[in-house]
Image (cartoon, helix red, strand yellow):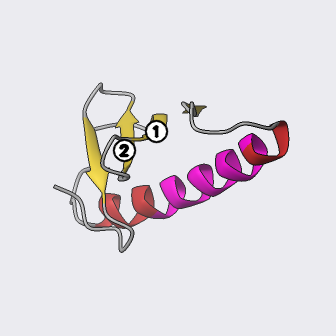
Amino acid sequence: MHTINNETNTIDEFKRLKAYLEQRAKEHYENHKKAFENWRFGEIDKVWIDKDGFICIQYDSGDWWPYKENGEWW
């Protein structure tokens, strides 16, 4: 999983944000996958926070979604 992070100033901040993003991405991925009978998008490829503060996940297929904190995607 690639974590894109341009918002930190120190290594410690980077590590904390990276761990947070990876954990939330895994949770969102598992919940999103349950909504499909046949998940066809693959595993998590990239994770980042967009300009509006939403966690975005791109999958191996190239498809990506933004996720609200509660896991809702659109």
Q: Which residue is mark 1?
A: 48
In the structure shown, which secondary structural element does the residue marked by tag 1 occupy? strand
Q: Which residue is mark 2?
A: 56
Question: Residue sitting at 16 percent across and 55 percent down?
Answer: 74
Question: Residue sitting at 38 percent across and 52 percent down?
Answer: 53
Q: Within the magenta stretch, is there residue 21?
A: yes
- In this rendering, the answer to whether 35 lies above or below 67 is below
Residue 70, picture quadrant: bottom left
Q: Amino acid at mark 2?
A: Cys
Residue furthest front in the image? 9
Residue 6, picture quadrant: top right
| Spatial separation of the CA atoms under disc 1 and disc 2 | 5 Å
Q: Residues within 10 Å of mark 1 (few under 14, many from 20)?
A: many
Q: Earlier in the sequence, mark 1 or mark 2?
A: 1
Q: Which residues are magenta?
A: 14-27
* Near-viewer residue (34 or 70): 70
Q: Amino acid at mark 1?
A: Trp
Does residue 21 appear in the picture of this structure? Answer: yes
Does residue 40 appear in the picture of this structure? Answer: no
